Image: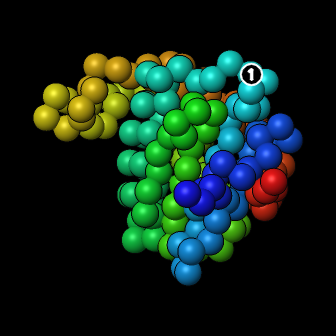
Amino acid sequence: MERIASFCVDHTILEKGVYVSRIDGDVTTYDIRMRLPNREKVMDNAAIHTIEHLFATFARNSEYKDSVIYFGPMGCRTGFYFLTRSLDNQTVLDLIRAAFKFIAEYEGEIPGTTAKECGNYLDHDLETAKAEAAQMVTILKPFTIKNMTYL
């Protein structure tokens, strides 16, 4: 079998931030890296789940909602993938920054957290998600999107 692109990323040099992982026609996959792979403790599942709910809700309610395809966690628990259609990198970075700011300041009920709406509705941690998001707000403040480095 062919080796898939995400297994060809040099994880030993990845830093925190946002990377263009791949481009497929008008769809761009962004790697939002929140941990240094294999060098820091991975994120907590409950916080990841809450970030997923809040980020997806924010992005899918933004002016770019028709260009948002997917937001979800990486299996390695060091970040998220964000897929968009026909948006430039600066617009996506601004949307990511705004989403993390929204999460960092969020108060209230987490959207989509009933047994009917979510397959693991009890596994959420708003306070840890807010702290994770606040760190990303700081990291992304001076950041520009980079291209992924492959092996």
Q: Residues within 10 Å of mark 1 (few under 14, many from 20)?
A: few
Q: Is residue 16 above or below residue 61?
A: above
- The reply to whether residue 21 is in sight is yes
User: In which quarter of the view is residue 74 placed?
Assistant: top right
User: In which quarter of the view is residue 80 placed?
Assistant: top right
Residue located at (86% from left, 41% from top): 13
Quadrant location of the C terminus? bottom right
Question: Which of the pair 126/7 is nearer the observer?
Answer: 7
User: Disc 1 residue type?
Assistant: Glu
- The residue sitting at the front extreme is 1
Residue located at (79% from left, 46% from top): 10
Q: Secondary structure at mark 1?
A: loop
Q: How many marks?
A: 1
- The reply to whether residue 140 is in sight is no
Would residue 56 be found to the left or right of residue 134 on screen? left
Which residue does the numbered mark 1 point to in the structure image? Answer: 40
Q: Is residue 148 above or below residue 25?
A: above
Q: Is residue 124 above or below residue 23?
A: above
Q: Position of residue 31 (x, y in %)?
A: 64, 51
Q: Position of residue 124 (x, y in %)?
A: 38, 22
Q: Is residue 27 above or below residue 136?
A: below
Residue located at (59% from left, 24% from top): 43
Question: Which of the pair 110/81 is nearer the observer?
Answer: 81
Q: Position of residue 96 (x, y in %)?
A: 60, 52
Quadrant location of the N terminus? bottom right
- The residue sitting at the bottom extreme is 25
Residue located at (26% from left, 26% from top): 121
Would residue 26 be found to the left or right of residue 12 on screen? left
- The residue sitting at the left extreme is 116
Q: Position of residue 54 (x, y in %)?
A: 43, 40
